[in-house]
């Protein structure tokens, strides 16, 4: 029996939404002053107004529907991230129907409170800031897969900043890797000083041996940690 009540729809819809969102609009600069002309010129990206991320409606933490001003390229990355999260979630979950959070005034950062999907005609949370369990860490893994700046705040909400994904050695990335090794993979001996060694053992265990501090290794480590945390693959 097929336990997915939304066959084909979530992957295709999310993939299409991510592709449709991948547009960056470049503004036209005004005439520079002499001082500005001496400095490197950086293209500006006007904000666009959106009330969805991929197929999911945006909701404020109080539950209100919102339309937010966001950088176009950041919105495209958010759509790609949500498609990735959904594609690696249990088959019985629908495509996410709500993303609860706040977008920064500059439109280049999101503070995530919840991701909601439907299962058996009920609205459920695949990620909730107040629930510090495997699904929380799995979602943090998915964000590290897509963004260079990911910060778990004291209340469990997660703030992500725009930019190209990849391992940079930032303290937040190392702290996540240690937590994932300990809490998702059962390696209680993982430490900040030797995190790459422990993450390398995890990758080898999953049949994907590589250097966790490399671009490919970091992508693989965050991907398998997402799948293990959401229960779609055990790698046992």
Image: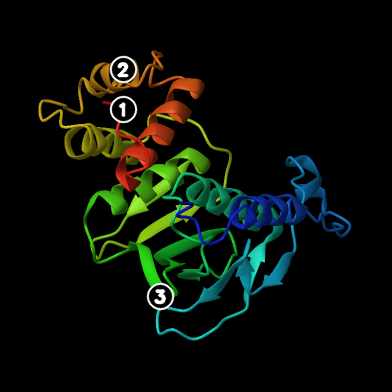
The residue at 61%/50% (across/down) is 11
User: Please, is residue 10 above or below residue 216 in the view?
Assistant: below
Residue 192 picture location, percent across and down: 20, 28
User: Is residue 112 toward the left or the right of residue 171 in the image?
Assistant: right
The residue at 75%/63% (across/down) is 46
- Which type of secondary structure does the marked residue at label 1 adopt? loop
For label 3, the crowd category at 10 Å Cα-Cα, with few meaning under 14, some 14 to 19 and many 20 or more, is few
**Can residue 167 be seen in this snapshot?**
no
Residue 112 picture location, percent across and down: 42, 63
Mark 1 or mark 3, which is nearer the start of the sequence?
3
Q: Can you identify the residue that label 3 sits on?
A: 122
- Which type of secondary structure does the marked residue at label 2 adopt? helix
User: Please, is residue 62 above or below residue 121 in the view?
Assistant: below
**Can residue 20 be seen in this snapshot?**
yes
Q: In front: mark 3 or mark 2?
A: 3
User: Is residue 199 toward the left or the right of residue 52 in the image?
Assistant: left
Tell me which corner region of the image, top left, top right, bottom left or bottom right, holds residue 79.
bottom right
Front one among 129 and 55 = 55
Mark 1 or mark 2, which is nearer the start of the sequence?
2
Mark 2 or mark 3, which is nearer the start of the sequence?
3
| Alpha carbons under labels 3 and 2: distance apart | 39 Å
Task: For the C terminus, give its image quadrant.
Answer: top left
For label 1, the crowd category at 10 Å Cα-Cα, with few meaning under 14, some 14 to 19 and many 20 or more, is few
- Which type of secondary structure does the marked residue at label 3 adopt? strand
Q: Can you identify the residue that label 2 sits on?
A: 200
* Marks 3 and 2 in Cβ contact (< 8 Å): no
Q: Can you identify the residue that label 1 sits on?
A: 235
Front one among 131 and 205 = 205
């Amino acid at each position: 029996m097929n336990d997915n009540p939304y066959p084909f729809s979530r992957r295709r819809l999310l993939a299409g939404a991510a592709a449709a969102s991948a547009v960056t609009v470049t503004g036209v600069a005004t005439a520079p002053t002499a001082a500005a002309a001496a400095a490197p010129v950086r293209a500006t990206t006007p904000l666009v107004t959106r009330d969805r991320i991929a197929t999911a409606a945006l909701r404020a933490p109080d539950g209100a529907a919102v339309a937010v001003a966001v950088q176009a390229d950041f919105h495209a990355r958010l759509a790609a991230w949500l498609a990735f999260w959904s594609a690696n979630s249990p088959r019985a979950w629908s495509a996410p129907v709500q993303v609860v959070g706040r977008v920064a005034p500059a439109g280049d950062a999101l503070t995530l409170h919840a991701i909601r999907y439907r299962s058996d005609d009920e609205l459920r949370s695949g990620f909730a800031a107040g629930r510090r369990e495997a699904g929380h860490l799995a979602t943090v893994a998915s964000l590290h897969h897509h963004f260079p700046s990911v910060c778990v705040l004291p209340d469990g909400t997660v703030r992500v900043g725009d930019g190209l994904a990849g391992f940079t050695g930032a303290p937040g990335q190392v702290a996540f890797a240690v937590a994932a090794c300990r809490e998702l993979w059962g390696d209680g001996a993982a430490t900040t000083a030797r995190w790459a060694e422990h993450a390398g053992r995890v990758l080898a265990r999953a049949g994907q041996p590589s250097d966790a501090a490399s671009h490919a290794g970091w992508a693989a480590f965050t991907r398998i940690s997402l799948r293990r945390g959401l229960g779609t693959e055990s790698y046992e």
